[in-house]
Structure formats: C-alpha cells, structure tokens
Image (cartoon, grey):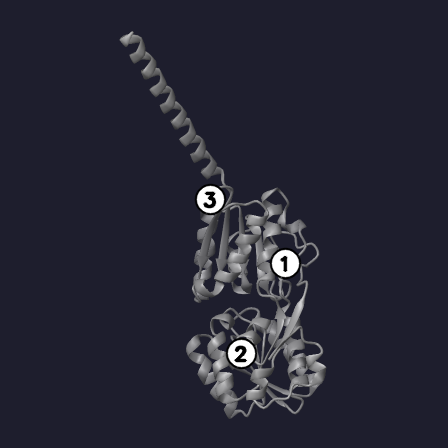
C-alpha cells in the first residue's frame, strides 16, 4: 500500500510539473506572439503623456489589453528632434508590427527608417506638401494616418486675429522655422496676410531659451499682435508663452482651445487628442491585415475656437461680436 501510494503521489507530482511547464510555455508563446506597437514622439514624455494615454484608452476600447493582447514600445526624443532618426531605427529593429508617430519631424524620420513597417501618423500638418504621402485619398506605401491641417489653419488663425484686433497692421509669428511643418504654415499665413494687408515677421524659437528674446524682438519691431505657429515646442512652452504675452501686453493667437483655457487670449484649432484617439482604429485595421496605403489620410472632424474674456479684459481688448458668435467656448 505504501509503495502504491508513493507511486500515485509521484505520478500526480510529475503530471503537475508537466502541466505547469506546458502552461508556462503557452504563456511564453502568447507573450512572444503578442503584436508590438511602436510609439514615437519628438515631444517630452510629460508633455506627450495625455495624447498617448488617449491612444491607449482607445485601443483598450477596441479590445487590446496591454500586456495581454498588445505590447507598446514607447520612444520619446524628449524635445531633441535630432534623436528621432535613431529612435525610429530602434523601433524598426525590435521589430514592431506598426508604428504610431507624432508630428511632422517624427514621421519624416520614421519614413526614412522603414518602407515596410506600417506607419500611422498623428498631428501632422500637411503630409502631402512635406512629402510623407502622395495624396490623401489613397496614400499608397506604408504610411497613412491623420492630419491636423495646421498650414491651412494658420491662415484662418491670422484672419481671426485680424478680426479680433482690426487695427493691427504689424503681426509677428513665433515659431521654429526648422520644423518641417513650419514652412507650410508660414507660406499660408503670408498668403493670407497679403489679402488682409498686414505685415508679417517671423521671430524664431528653436529652443526654450529663445522664447523670451523672441518676445523682446517682437516688441522692438512694434508688433501689434502675435500668432503662435504650431510646432512640437508649443505645448511644452505653453505656460511660459502665455506668461510672456501677458507681461508684454500683446494679444496673441494660439493653436488650440487648451491654450485659451490655460490663459491665452484666443485659440483656434483641432482637439489635440482627437487624432491619437482615432489612430487606434487604424492600428486595429492594420493589425487585422489592412494595408496602410489603402486607408485614406483623414482630416479633423471638428475645429474649435475658444476665447478667454478674462485675458481680453486684462489686455484691454474688446472681442468683437463677430468673433464671439463663432466661438465654441467663451471663458469668463
């Protein structure tokens, strides 16, 4: 009886070990076969976090649970765009199944790094004019995604700024001309300026230390209003930009509702999180076999205008009724 009990116990132990081994092997296989999604941004991690959180949440709603059915590989250039080519190449070597890439500089780096891994671009101004895709309707190749139309919107921002400050004839632009998307914005703003009969001048900021000198230069030029171009530096410098605009008492147009909510005078643009949320649907389609070149590049579904009346009062600016009636949000 003792011998039978011993043999029975041994068999149970062996079976348990085999089952455990099979379970561990299956688990390991599951992790290995889990699709990897690369995420690349030029922005500092803290600045970019809300956008990527929105993307992950949208992926979760589609059934992708991090660590169980999808793995994310996140890379940030931490505000140093010269690092983007290295980081893009790093993601391609992992390899990842698809890359979600923010902003124009990030996508240009990703395009150079791979012609085979699908790329879903987000927060890109004009992908055709900067050479990311040949056309929006059928991009072809390995790149598709979402544009924020920042070039065309720059012209509308200038128009709204002139409507807000009708006496302004000298308007400064603050932004980074080295950003690939800046040229598109500058060209469209200059075309609008000719129709509005205003002088434009660009004041360069390629790094945070140049922001205050840019404001000083604009004041020396006697700028009557300022237009903030949309580039990767904008969000990380938002608070300081709004502070300097208040200090120099110059009306300033920003590129999103969030800028007005943070104390800027007026902001016009897309919801900055929209393209990240929508990107999840494209990642889902690509992981299920759709070719990125068959997915059209999509434009924003909505543009938002926000006006901060408290800031207007502090600057002694009376917002015209024609602007207020267009506003989606009026902050008092």
Q: Is residue 122 visible?
A: yes
Please tell me whether mark 2 sits on a helix, a strand or a loop: loop
Residue displayed at 43% across by 76% down: 208
Q: Residue 310 placed where, x, y %? A: 57, 83
Q: Is residue 142 visible?
A: no
Tag nearer the camera, 2 or 3: 2
**Can you tell which mark lies on residue 67?**
3
Residue corresponding to mark 1: 133
Residue 154: quadrant of the picture? bottom right
Residue displayed at 64% across by 67% down: 149
Question: Where the C terminus falls, by quadrant?
Answer: bottom right
Spatial CA distance of label 2 from label 3 is: 39 Å
Q: Is residue 76 above or below residue 328?
A: above
Of callouts 1 and 3, the N-terminal one:
3
Seen in the image, is 165 located left or right of residue 243?
A: right
Q: Residue 61 placed where, x, y %? A: 58, 49
Q: Is residue 9 above or below residue 137?
A: above
Residue at the outermost front position: 1
Q: Residues within 10 Å of mark 3 (few under 14, many from 20)?
A: few
Q: Residues within 10 Å of mark 2 (few under 14, many from 20)?
A: many
Residue displayed at 63% across by 58% down: 133
Name the residue nearer the viewer: 59 or 314: 314
Q: Are marks 2 and 1 in contact (CB under 8 Å)?
A: no
Please tell me whether mark 1 sits on a helix, a strand or a loop: loop
Question: Where the N terminus falls, by quadrant?
Answer: top left
Residue corresponding to mark 2: 263
Tag nearer the camera, 2 or 1: 2
Seen in the image, is 300 located left or right of residue 69?
A: right
Please tell me whether mark 3 sits on a helix, a strand or a loop: loop
Of callouts 2 and 3, the N-terminal one:
3
Q: Residue 129 placed where, x, y %? A: 63, 66
């Amino acid at each position: 009886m003792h011998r039978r009990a011993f043999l029975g116990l041994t068999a149970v132990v062996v079976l348990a070990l085999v089952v455990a081994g099979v379970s561990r092997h299956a688990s390991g296989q599951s992790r290995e076969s889990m699709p990897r999604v690369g995420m690349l941004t030029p922005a500092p991690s803290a600045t970019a976090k809300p956008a990527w959180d929105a993307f992950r949440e949208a992926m979760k709603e589609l059934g992708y649970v991090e660590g169980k059915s999808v793995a994310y590989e996140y890379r940030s250039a931490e505000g140093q765009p010269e690092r983007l080519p290295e980081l893009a190449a790093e993601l391609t070597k992992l390899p990842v199944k698809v890359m979600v890439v923010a902003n124009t500089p990030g996508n240009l780096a990703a395009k150079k790094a791979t012609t085979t891994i699908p790329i879903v671009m987000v927060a890109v101004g004009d992908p055709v004019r900067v050479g990311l895709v040949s056309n929006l309707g059928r991009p072809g190749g390995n790149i598709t995604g979402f544009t924020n139309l920042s070039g065309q919107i720059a012209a509308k921002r200038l128009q709204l700024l002139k409507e807000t400050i009708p006496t302004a004839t000298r308007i400064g632009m603050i932004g980074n001309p080295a950003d690939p998307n800046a040229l598109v914005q500058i060209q469209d703003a200059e075309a609008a300026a000719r129709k509005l009969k205003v002088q434009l001048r660009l004041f360069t900021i390629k790094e945070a230390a140049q922001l205050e000198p840019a404001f000083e230069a604009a004041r020396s030029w006697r700028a009557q209003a300022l237009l903030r171009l949309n580039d990767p530096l904008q969000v990380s410098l938002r608070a300081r930009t709004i502070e300097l605009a208040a200090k120099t008492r110059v009306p300033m147009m920003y590129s999103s509702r969030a800028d007005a909510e943070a104390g800027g005078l007026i902001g016009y643009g897309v919801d900055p999180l929209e393209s990240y949320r929508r990107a999840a649907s494209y990642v889902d389609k690509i992981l299920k076999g759709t070719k990125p070149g068959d997915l059209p590049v999509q434009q924003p579904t909505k543009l938002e205008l926000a006006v901060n009346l408290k800031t207007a009062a502090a600057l002694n600016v009376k917002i015209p009724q024609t602007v207020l009636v267009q506003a989606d949000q009026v902050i008092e």
